[in-house]
Image (cartoon, rainbow, N blue to C red):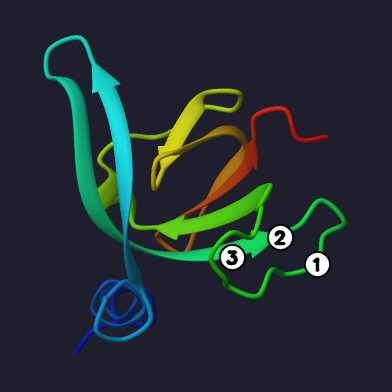
Amino acid sequence: MLNFKDQLAKDVQNVFMNPLEFAEMHEVTTATPNRGVLKRMLPMIIEKFTLDGKPVQHADGVSVHNVVVHISPDVLAYTPRVDQAFVLDGATYDVKGISNDTGIFKIVLQANGAG
C-alpha cells in the first residue's frame, strides 16, 4: 500500500496531468546549443489573467498578458529560471516566478512588454 505522499504523486501524474482528465496539450519551444530549436507538445494546466488580475474567458483574439502554468517537472525536463524567456504556444513570456508544489511546477509567466 502506498503512503500518502506516494499516492499524491501518482494521482498528480495519472489524473491532474493526464490530458484525458484535467490537463491540456500545449506547445513549448526551447532552444539548446546541442539540439537547436525543439518544439514539444506537453500536458499542462494553464490559468490566464488580464493585467488587472481577472481570469480571461477563453476566446480567440483575446490578449492575455499573465499566465500560470502547472506542469510536471519530469515532462518539462528542465527547471526554468526567473527572467528567462519561455515560449508557450508560439507566444514569448518572461518567467516571473517558479515553485514546485506537490510534485508540480507552478510557473508564473508575463508577456513581454506587459506592465
Q: What residue sits right under mark 1 in the picture? A: 54
Q: Is residue 87 above or below residue 34?
A: below
Q: Are marks 1 and 3 in contact (CB under 8 Å)?
A: no
Q: Is residue 1 above or below residue 8?
A: below
Residue at 19%, 31% (x, y): give it: 38
| Amino acid type, callout 1 | Lys
Say what secondary structure mark 2 lies in: strand
Quarter in which the C terminus is drawn:
top right
Neighbourhood count class around disc 2 (C-alpha, 10 Å): few under 14, some 14–19, many 20 upward: some
Task: Locate residue 3, reporting x and y percent.
Answer: 31, 82
**Quadrant position of residue 13:** bottom left
Say what secondary structure mark 1 lies in: loop
Q: Are marks 3 and 2 in contact (CB under 8 Å)?
A: yes
| Amino acid type, callout 2 | Phe
Say what secondary structure mark 3 lies in: strand
Quarter in which the N terminus is drawn:
bottom left
Q: Earlier in the sequence, mark 1 or mark 2?
A: 2
Q: CA distance from mark 1 to mark 3?
A: 10 Å
Residue at 30%, 49% (x, y): give it: 27
Residue toward you, 39 or 5: 39
| Amino acid type, callout 3 | Glu
| Disc number for residue 70 | none
Residue at 37%, 74% (x, y): give it: 5
Q: Are marks 1 and 2 in contact (CB under 8 Å)?
A: yes
Looking at this rendering, what residue extends furthest in the bottom direction? 1
Q: What residue sits right under mark 3 in the picture? A: 47
Q: What residue sits right under mark 2 in the picture? A: 49
Neighbourhood count class around disc 3 (C-alpha, 10 Å): few under 14, some 14–19, many 20 upward: few
Task: Locate residue 34, reporting x and y percent.
Answer: 12, 12
